[in-house]
Amino acid sequence: MDSETANNQSPLVWFIGGSDTCCGAGIQADLLSGHDFSVQIATVVSAVTAQTASSFEAIEAVGDDIFRSQIEALSINMVPAVVKIGLLANSAQFTIVANMLLALKAQLPGMLVVFDPVVKSSTSGHMQSGVTRTDYGVLLPVVDVITPNAHELEFLSDIACDSPTAVLKACAALRHQGVKTVIAKGGHYNFNDAALDLLVGEQHILLSSPRIQTEHQHGTGCSFASALASMLALGYPLEDAFVVAKAYINQGLSAATGSVSSTGQLSTGSIAHLGWPKSRAFFPQVIETGELAKAYAIPQPAWPLPKAAFKDCGVQALGLYPVVDDVLWIEKLLNLGIKTMQLRIKDPKRSDLEAQIKKAIILGSQFDARVFINDYWQLAIKHNAYGVHLGQEDIQAADLAEIQLAGVRLGLSTHGYYELLRAHQLRPSYLALGHIFPTTTKDMPSKPQGLKRLKDYAELINDYPLVAIGGIDASKMSAVARCGVGSIAVVRAVTQATDLQQAVTRLQGLMYDEDIQQSLSSIGS
């Protein structure tokens, strides 16, 4: 499901969990998190608790009949994009939820299930009556993503998680029970200086954040899983949901405060809920190399990564950026005054490949233009190219350090939050954000980003020139430019134009009308 359904309604998330009297965790935290991400919400209450952020007093599970009736009521006409499960208070609730999810998934194959297991409260109160690993085993095969902390991972896997190797084994044990993806939250581990969060599934991702020293941590687990579920419901891929959910928690912990009692004492508080995270300071680091990455079995790049930043482009706004497949186009565009362009030849067996690249580089130098070579970084280095453009898959395969040492500029494609952070850490010459709209010029593994996401990305990272790419023609130029990017890549808008000069003039005019120039004034030139 994408960010909005066909009738322009926000997607629906079911939250199943316990009620928290102090509103810091459980269903109340789910509600606050879900509203922060603008999803529709429905709830199923599994238990009523008596607790504060610093003490746990009592819990009572709701009766089986009313628990089942809540689910049946929602099933009538409230179709979920995601079901997020928190506290299940007894064995019967595990069976009821597992059966419900099996039936729902048969009707809604695209529906996702996020499970945040709650073995005990953050104040060490036991939350479940007679629940065993066998009960969890009934539910796990229908779970898409599980988000255990250290204690929960140890309980569910029966493995002492006292090292990275043990954490990996525990995650593998849960996947063996049927869970598709395990996110092992790292806040409780004491063998890492930073807070490390590990995703193990089809992907293998390690995120690192500085530990935030605060005693006001009530509700962090619930809020993380709720943010993750909301992001998935909005149509974001799992890696993006993971990154943003972590940023949401870092933001909330940084602003968390306690409450003052009638005697004037400050009590322990809950995580703050402050909306969609916008500040890069709260976003985690993607760990891909080094001893930590090796310890957590993160796939290593084929070559050492560069230690220095790539050469910059000299300007922040790269302007109109045609992407073409033949040096003849390069020559035509240079003669029309275009200063940024890319030669993208898809066929590596093309007989004149090197000749095309060599001539494009020479022409770029003659016209003092920024000509980037797509993919063929070895040839770009050989012929002293201005720059090379690479995709995310090339980060693992290309010798980025050699490109950087050769003084060749680097542009990197990104398709969401995770890839944006990953690319940012390499300090490239520019970042491409895409694909913004549906496109037929290239097979894309991701969904179109749309204008809202483009604007969010541009606000998050603006250290480099930003290039919007994918399905952009004259009708969309102005709207894209208003999202805060200083460059727009076009393909068919140029190559299929009946009058190239007229098309270029029109595209540039649409990109740089007076209103847009004012909005881009902070980008510079």
Image: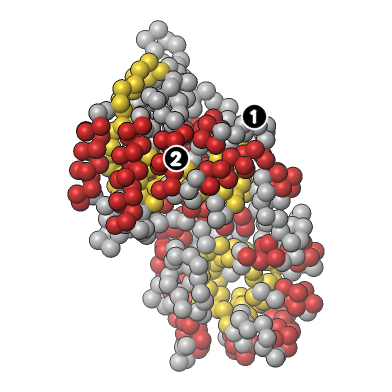
Q: Identify the mark at residue 137; answer none if there is no mark.
A: 2
| Mark 2 neighbour class, 10 Å CA radius: few under 14, some 14 to 19, many 20 or more | some
Q: Secondary structure at mark 2?
A: helix
Q: Nearer the viewer, residue 430 or 402?
A: 402
User: What residue is disc 1 on?
Assistant: 190
Left or right: 446 as drawn, with respect to 57: right
Residue 398 seen: yes
Question: Where in the figure is residue 197, as x and y percent of width and height?
Answer: 58, 41
Q: Amino acid at mark 2?
A: Gly
Q: Quadrant of the C terminus?
A: bottom right
Give the tally of numbered discs. 2
Q: Are marks 1 and 2 in contact (CB under 8 Å)?
A: no
Q: CA distance from mark 1 to mark 2?
A: 28 Å
Query: Coloring scheme of the render?
Result: secondary structure
Where is 10 relative to 510, above or below? Answer: above
Q: Secondary structure at mark 1?
A: loop
Image-quadrant location for residue 169: top right
Left or right: 100 as drawn, with respect to 368: left
Comparing labels 1 and 2, the label whose residue is closer to the camera: 2
Tell me which residue sits at (25%, 28%) in the image.
63
Q: Nearer the viewer, residue 310 or 70?
A: 70
Tell me which residue sits at (67%, 76%) in the image.
373
Q: Amino acid at mark 1?
A: Asn
Tell me which residue sits at (74%, 45%) in the image.
291
Question: Where in the figure is residue 221, as x and y percent of width and height?
Answer: 46, 34
Where is 375 relative to 134, above or below? Answer: below
